[in-house]
Amino acid sequence: MIRLLDVVKEFDGKRKVRALDGVSLHIEKGEMAALVGPSGSGKSTLLNLIGTLDRPTAGEIFLDGRKLSGLSDTELTLLRRDKIGFIFQFFNLLPSLTCLENVALPLHLRGWKRAQARARAEELLELVGLKHRLDHLPDELSGGERQRVAIARALSVYPPILLADEPTGNLDTKTGAEILELIRGLHRRLGATVLMVTHDPGVAASCERTITLRDGRLAGDEARVPRR
């Protein structure tokens, strides 16, 4: 599903910084993997490259068998739209839109009819336990509820790949555990490939696999039987 071959990413500034240095990695369809490592190790950079938000300096990335380097910006946008769901640490909800409108927005951008988009948004909000919050604004929700809305939005087209950047990092311990269990439950139910950046050892331990980056290089890759 996700394959990287000798991926390098450099950023130019006063000094050239090599954020990723020859990373090769293969994540199978349906896996749930944690991406860990110290700050500055390249985790978010790697997630952005896999999510087609940026391009590598060298090396190749394949998603679902497609080589990304051969795709135009428009083709990458369509791939990102149809194949990838993003969950961010700080939710990124539009404050002037209700929960229902936030979840339905990506569907409207895909050209869905209003009734279709509303029905799917209601279905997803019920799936994440927020059927009673359809008409609430983000400021009227708790942090955990906002993250649930963000997860529902990420799942709008049931994407085969779900990328999460510290999805529990801005939440208290109890709420973070609830969000993690929600993601794990959705992974089991929908069969999506999940890659999650985290600094939390407990979050990493709940995944089937832990991939460790250090100084932009692959420093560890451990598979385990996940907790049920």
Image: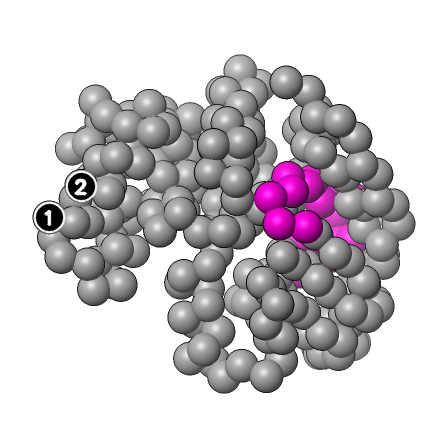
Q: Residue at x 48, y 56 (%)?
A: 84
When the figure is inspected, residue 25 is found, relative to residue 90, above or below; the finding is below
Residue 53 in view in this figure: yes
Where residue 69 appears, as percent x and y from the top left, is 62, 80
Where residue 78 appears, as percent x and y from the top left, is 41, 70
Residue 167 colored magenta?
Answer: no
Residue under pointer 2: 119
Q: Residue furthest right?
A: 219
- Is label 2 in a helix, a strand or a loop? helix
Where residue 74 appears, as percent x and y from the top left, is 42, 80
Colour scheme used in the picture?
Answer: one colour
Q: Residue at x 70, y 26 (%)?
A: 226
Give amino acid for label 1. Ala
Residue in front for this viewpoint, 160 or 14? 160
Residue 150 in view in this figure: no
35 relative position to 108: left or right? right
User: In which image quadrant can residue 139 be found?
Assistant: top left
Residue in front for this viewpoint, 35 or 208? 208
- Is label 1 in a helix, a strand or a loop? helix
When the figure is inspected, residue 190 is found, relative to residue 142, above or below; the finding is below
Q: Residue at x 75, y 26 (%)?
A: 225
User: In which image quadrant can residue 204 be found?
Assistant: top right
Q: Quadrant of the N terminus?
A: bottom right
Residue 37 colored magenta?
Answer: yes
Q: CA distance from mark 2 to mark 1?
A: 6 Å
Q: Residue at x 45, y 78 (%)?
A: 75
Give amino acid for label 2. Ala
Looking at the rendering, the stretch of residues picked out in magenta corresponds to 28-45
**Residues at discs 2 and 1 in contact (Cβ within 8 Å):** yes
Residue under pointer 1: 115
